[in-house]
Amino acid sequence: MNSFELQPLLEGNRRALAKAITLVESKRESHRAQAQGILEQVLPHSGNSIRIGITGVPGVGKSTFIEAFGLYLIAQGKRVAVLAVDPSSPLAGGSILGDKTRMEELSRREEAFIRPSPSEGTLGGVAQKTRETMLLCEAAGYDVILVETVGVGQSEYQVAGMVDFFMVLMLPGGGDELQGIKKGIMELADALVINKADGDSEKLAQMTRGQYTSAMNLLRHTSFWTPRVMACSALQGTNIDSVWGMVLDYYFQALEKGAFQSKRARQNRDWMHQLVNEMLHMKLQQNPRVKEMLPLLEQQVESQTTTAYAAARQIIDELW
């Protein structure tokens, strides 16, 4: 894709967007260089969306929620992109491949763009691909970017580090479930949303909401925003409007406090540092002298004939 083809992407052409994302996902060095050129050009046209991270325990109805939420946003005149981060699945590319068929109605809508995560194994892994895809989607005029984490552990932290608002979906079921969620994830959450608050579970969902609200109040939040706990039913479409209202409330408060831009600036800076570390690691791995030294040094460290620090120092000295 040459620069003269950039215009269709900026006009929201889905084929041009898909082509640009394919370049970003490519492992070929020539494609990566081309992709970086495109990203440099779209940068002034990006950053105009609300980026929402969504995670949740298995069985919480994430794809049902994303479809209901996405369709509601489209009805409000928004264009919605759904991206996935799944570092646990380098082969299948994450459950969203299956979810795309389950999000049948949303995937058929012209105003929606659903993209599964690519396989990992290159610099920055899926987190880099998702970040760059997000910029391309923003340049193509998508107002809301939903970043779904379908892996466990590290992927939640990666997603929280690239979005404006981080939402954790929960099931009605009482405080016991809090044990299943790491405290760190709770501290990352801007909102807990209890899904499946319908039928027999409606009363239980309200009880759960009370328990989660108490639990969230115990955590110390340094931000201007006090995380909220809400209940909804994606299946019946109830309270989906309230979830969006809450996100907007956060967005306008963040703009007013100047927190919005500073958060994004901090995320970009942290991402740069992460990439520097990964590039240095890659340079080390590709260095022929380091490759030659490594087996012997590993052996010496294992047999305790040298310290790990001394061995690491020797490797680093090879670069300078």
Image (cartoon, helix red, strand yellow):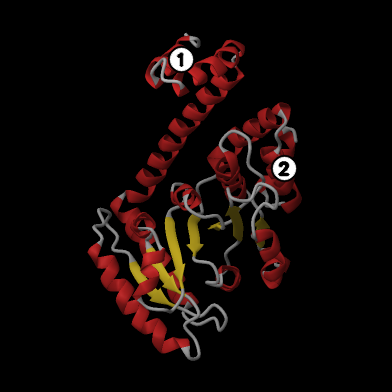
Q: Which residue is mark 1?
A: 316
Residue 303 visible in the picture: yes
> Which percent across, then down, holds residue 188?
37, 55
* Residue lying at the far front of the rendered structure: 303
123 left or right of 15 in image: left
The residue at 43%/18% (across/down) is: 312
Disc 2 residue type (three-letter):
Thr
Q: Could you tell me which secondary element the residue under label 2 belongs to? A: helix
- Residue 17: which disc? none
Q: Camera-side residue: 31 or 171?
A: 171
Q: Which mark is residue 22?
A: 2
Mark closer to the chain start, 1 or 2:
2
Q: Tell me where residue 63 appears, x and y as whole percent.
A: 60, 68
Q: CA distance from mark 1 to mark 2?
A: 35 Å
Q: Residues within 10 Å of mark 2 (few under 14, many from 20)?
A: some
Judge whether 227 appears above or below 115 on screen. below
Look at label 1 and name its amino acid: Ile
